[in-house]
Image (spheres, rainbow, N blue to C red):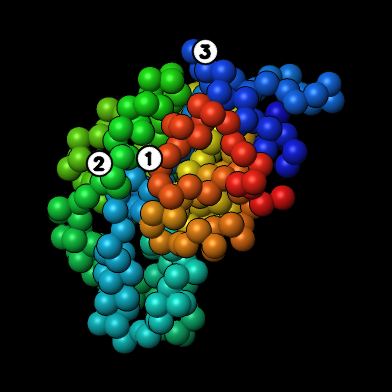
Amino acid sequence: MRLTRRRSLSVLPALAALTGNAVAQPKDDDEDPPMTIKLVALDIGGTLIADHGEVPDAMLGAFSRHGITVTPQEFAEWRGAAKREMVRHFVARASKSDTLIEPIYADFMATAGKAYEKVQPIPGAEQAMKELTAMKLLLATTTGFDRVLTTAILSRLGWQHYFAASISSDEVSEGRPAPYMLFRAMEAARVYEPAQVIAVGDTPLDLLAATNGGMGAAIGVYSGAATEERLRKERNSGVLPSVAALPDLIRRGLPLSHCRV
């Protein structure tokens, strides 16, 4: 079942009555039957771990060292995208040879990997995951990082056990704003309905991917790459300071004042 805009906004307010899994109740007689929320798909960089500019610093440096100029403003529009796709885009835009793609990507990975050796979680992120798990919700990660960096980050934090699925951008044919990572997370977690999924991320591309996939709710957090104002310009089911506020939002329901209609 694919929720309409009206129905997607009605999913979260009813989550306050949590018994077992989170269940959304219909608002009136013309609504669909109650929909169970089963899966929370969480972005990593800027959503679960702190964003201190590691990704733009590493990527812009890699471009510069290979003779390609990309401004921070141009790069900002690609936050949340698959990193190799990002490299491919800017190499093509500069009319450079495709043979530069892998050296630039390798340069980025080496710098980013070193920067994330001392990865820091978003304050309250782990507690939020504990609370969501206690609600009997499944958790998954989706990320523009590749499998190598994703595994390194989660291992350093000791968080692997929280997730029913962990999907990286090199495991799908196309990254955000395509919804394929969300679909892969659903497959791995054995969740069948997109409307049973809440997607959470810190970039406009996170919200676009959730919308494109027909997820039950798209929650923006301004703890990372994008400002609250920028996130509210995209279709969303709520915008929060960080993922730390998510469990309480689910318990009490989502005020419509948080939504962009």
The amino acid marked with disc number 3 is Thr
Query: Mark 2 or mark 1: which is in front?
Result: 1
Disc 1 marks which residue?
Answer: 244
Gap in angstroms between the C-alphas marked 3 and 1: 21 Å
The answer to which of marks 3 and 1 sits earlier in the sequence is 3
Disc 2 marks which residue?
Answer: 154
Question: Which is more toward the observer, 73 or 135?
Answer: 135
Disc 3 marks which residue?
Answer: 19
Quarter of the image for residue 81 reads bottom left
Asked whether the viewer can see residue 209, the reply is no
Gap in angstroms between the C-alphas marked 2 and 1: 18 Å
The amino acid marked with disc number 2 is Leu
**Where residue 83 sits in the image (x, y, percent)?**
38, 61
Query: Mark 3 or mark 2: which is in front?
Result: 3
Q: Residues within 10 Å of mark 2 (few under 14, many from 20)?
A: some
Q: Residue furthest top?
A: 19
**Where residue 258 sits in the image (x, y, percent)?**
60, 46
Vertical order, 199 against 105 (above or below): above
Gap in angstroms between the C-alphas marked 3 and 2: 30 Å
Q: Name the side, left or right, on which 261 lies relative to 80.
A: right
Quarter of the image for residue 104 reads bottom left
Q: Secondary structure at mark 1?
A: helix
